[in-house]
Amino acid sequence: MPLHNIDTNFLDTLPNHYENDHIVEDEITTNMDKIKLFPMTIKNEDDLIHNIAIIATRSKDFWYKLLKEKRNMTKEEAYQQISQSASLFKAVLEYVGYSKTP
């Protein structure tokens, strides 16, 4: 989420952190179809670091967009943020050999 990756010197100008963190909390379990996984492959620790850096940079850039526009993220944007994290998590599980089936 973008507000976890920002300079807190701007606290008085921040979009509402609580509102952004909880924007889809009450509905996410009934809207799992809004989380779109995209391909991500992790073959080694360098790949993991690279993918984390990409997501962190996108999140930071998104935060600055919200700050410039003086608004909170939309639900659609929240699901996009969640989709990035879910895709990374899935890639990590695959990297460590986790399988849903025994």
Image (spheres, rainbow, N blue to C red):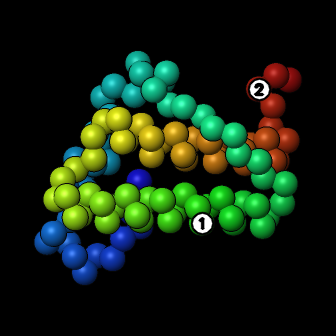
The extreme left residue here reads 12
Q: How far apart are labels 1 and 2 at the CA level?
A: 27 Å
Displayed quadrant of residue 76 = top left
Q: Position of residue 1 (x, y in %)?
A: 41, 54
Amino acid type, residue under disc 1 in the picture:
Ala
Check the image and report above or below for 50 versus 10. Answer: above
Check the image and report above or below for 38 versus 73. Answer: above
Q: Which residue is mark 2?
A: 100
Q: Circle 2: is it few (<14), some (14-19), or many (20+) Cα within 10 Å?
A: few
Q: Which residue is mark 1?
A: 53
The one of 74 and 95 positioned closer to us in this rendering: 74
Q: Tell me which residue sits at (84%, 60%) in the image.
A: 44
Q: Tell me which residue sits at (45%, 26%) in the image.
A: 34
Amino acid type, residue under disc 2 in the picture:
Lys
- Residue 29 visible in the picture: no
Q: Tell me which residue sits at (40%, 64%) in the image.
A: 61
Q: Position of residue 3 (x, y in %)?
A: 34, 61
| Secondary structure at numbered mark 1 | helix
Please report contact status of discs 1 and 2: CB closer than 8 Å, yes or no.
no
Q: Earlier in the sequence, mark 1 or mark 2?
A: 1
Displayed quadrant of residue 17 = bottom left
Left/right placement of residue 71 relative to residue 52 reads: left
Q: Position of residue 67 (x, y in %)?
A: 23, 63
Q: Tell me which residue sits at (78%, 67%) in the image.
A: 46
Q: Circle 1: is it few (<14), some (14-19), or many (20+) Cα within 10 Å?
A: few
- Residue 44 visible in the picture: yes
